[in-house]
Amino acid sequence: MELLQETKNLISEAKNICIIPSDDDQGEGVVNALALFYTLKDLQKNVNLIIDVFPEKLHFLIPSLDFISSPKNFIISIPRAKADVSQVYYEKNEENLKIHLTIDKGNIKKDNIAFYFSEPKPDLVITLGIKDFQDKLGKMDSFAFILDAPIINIDSSSDGYNKKFGNINMVEHASISQISMEIIEGLNENLLTPNVANCLLAGIMLHYHHFNHPATGHEIFEITAKLIKKGASQHRIAKELHKTTKEEAVFLSQIFQNIQTTPHHDVSLSMLDTQAFEHLSPEQITASVEKIKTMGIYDDLLVLWKSHASDPIIKGFFYSKKQELMEKIREHQQGDMKHDWILLHIPGANIADAKEKIFSLLL
């Protein structure tokens, strides 16, 4: 109760708030970020939602992407010590914007140019589903304006270890939606509007795998019933969350076209010797795995595909109900552990070598 009161106090006192959801938790962080966005807007707060890409399957939860407030004051910076720029002009057409610089002295390289947002420092940062904020900041070098602001860290401890980096750490053995709902009701139960209720219920359904997760107890159905009474549409949420995007459909098709049996612990293998899926988001991969699981076809499945980066890497996932196999792979390979599967990042460019590395762990 003390943590909840401290959280309420911080939110009540803040005027400018940034919300930052995780981008690798199948969308649970994003839908709860939306729930808090709606709530804080109703409280007349100035709210920015910082997110790289809004998942397509969650578009139904907002009127339009233009509705979301995000940082807009973007700066391009060139050190005077590197070059003396005497003129700046731009040309703009339907396809792009070009910025032209006239340099009198010096020479500009790409590494000399800095890009960042210049916004008023927020009074408060709220993170959702983020395990390690320093790691997240390393991928957000354009957002230096959020540094040193107090942080409310909201996360589910049942989804893995959290570094508890916040001034307040609402990290509990429950879904992020349950924690967010507790905060919103603590502020004012009337803030549970239909929009907020839809977002919270979507998070519940994502976390508990559409109520098929073993941890789905009676209290989850009681929360669901309450959210439905507040205006959430379980039928619509289920329909939208089960939609398959074009990219996911192609990905799943390629997995099944290339699937083969192996002699290793009855593990099925699918190697996609292409870089066509290098830009798949963690959310899209998670959605694809969940669809494979509902088919009930394979107990154990290893999928690998190529990805291009500054250092070559093979991406993939391993799904199994055998926890001893999951632990072996997690112990020896880089990867993000989920409930019954692990997202893999294997250094190297050779997909066959990556396969052998994983299979060597299954012996």
Image: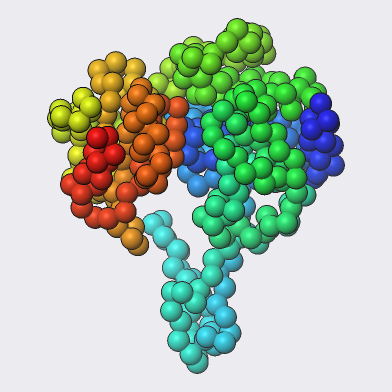
Residue nearest the viewer, comparing 256 with 243: 256
Q: Is residue 69 visible?
A: no
Residue most extreme to the front: 363
Q: Quadrant of residue 121?
A: bottom right
Q: Is residue 175 above or below residue 147?
A: above
Quadrant of the frame with the C terminus: top left
Q: Is residue 22 above or below residue 96?
A: above
Q: Residue 195: x percent and y percent?
A: 63, 23
Q: Residue 330: x percent and y percent?
A: 40, 39
Residue nearest the viewer, comparing 318 with 11: 318
Horizontal side, residue 123 vs residue 60: left or right: right
Q: Is residue 349 above or below residue 64?
A: below
Horizontal side, residue 306 vs residue 322: left or right: left
Task: Name the residue at 25% across, 45% down.
Answer: 357
Q: Residue 242: x percent and y percent?
A: 40, 21
Residue nearest the viewer, comparing 351 with 54: 351
Task: Name the residue at 58% across, 63% down.
Answer: 116
Residue nearest the viewer, comparing 21 with 333: 333
Quadrant of the frame with the N terminus: top right
Horizontal side, residue 247 vs residue 180: left or right: left
Q: Residue 216: x percent and y percent?
A: 54, 13
